[in-house]
Amino acid sequence: MGLRPSYSFSHRYTANMDPLFLDYCRQWLTAVAPDWEQDVAGRVSRMSDRDIPHSMKGRAKEVVALIQFIRERGLSDGVVDGLISAINYDRTYFDKITASLLPLMEKLISGRIGELISPDYEDMADTRPIFEWLDVIKRKGIVYVGLDALSDFTVSAAVGTASSPTWSPSPAPSTASTRASPRRCGIGRSRRFRSMPTR
């Protein structure tokens, strides 16, 4: 889809998964079932509120029609299967299981913190380098994160948890230092961060 994963991206689509499902299906079905648009449009025009399953009440009719089309055609894709599984959850139940996640995500994407751990790749005016865990692991580097936990413990805990899987929040000291290794950071994690200039 040409979209670069970020915390902002994750927050937006965790709160509302329908647009992500629709965008992905439009791209995927065009390749595997070229006639999908006419079929789905017909289903949407004939669909009434009574035809929508209870677990998908509140979802867009196009989402319901796409799921019906995919199942009836016997089509399968790893990403689509995962999205359908999440969409099939009762909306109230899904809101409950993500209730603790969204406040954390909001802390990670707000203000200057959001600029650091969810950088804008298209901002040419920002000359700070961007690094990811895999780069640090390959160079056997050490990541030092100044969290200022004494002045804002809640936000520092959120950032520390997001930036280092082995960091435990504690009011003091206010920094987290991690030697990057496959065991500690996890190869395959593609978290990217802006480097802060040293003073």
Image: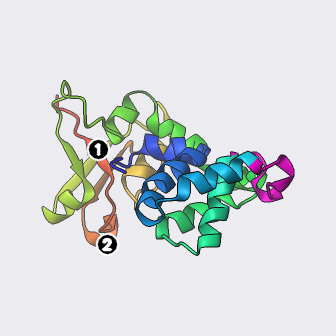
| Residue closer to the observer: 15 or 139 | 15
Q: For this view, does 188 lie left or right of residue 9?
A: left
Quarter residue 31 falls in: bottom left
| Residue closer to the observer: 120 or 103 | 120
Q: Which residues are magenta?
A: 46-60
In reply to whether residue 52 is colored magenta, the answer given is: yes
Considering every residue shown, the one lying at the far top of the view is 125
Q: Identify residue for label 1.
A: 193
Q: Residue at x 25, y 53 (%)?
A: 132
- Dot placed on the residue nearer the N-terminal end, 2 or 1: 2
Q: Is the Cβ of the residue at disc 2 closer than 8 Å to that at disc 1?
A: no
Above-or-below relation of 146 to 35: above
Select label 2 or label 1 by which is in front: 1
| Residue closer to the observer: 96 or 4 | 4
Above-or-below relation of 148 to 160: above
Q: Identify residue for label 2.
A: 183
Q: In this view of the protein, can residue 127 be seen by the observer?
A: yes
Q: Residue at x 26, y 48 (%)?
A: 144
Location of residue 47 in the rendering, given as x and y in whole percent from the top left corner: 77, 50
Above-or-below relation of 167 to 196: below
Q: Which amino acid type is marked by label 2?
A: Arg
| Residue closer to the observer: 49 or 163 | 49
Q: What's the image's color scheme?
A: rainbow
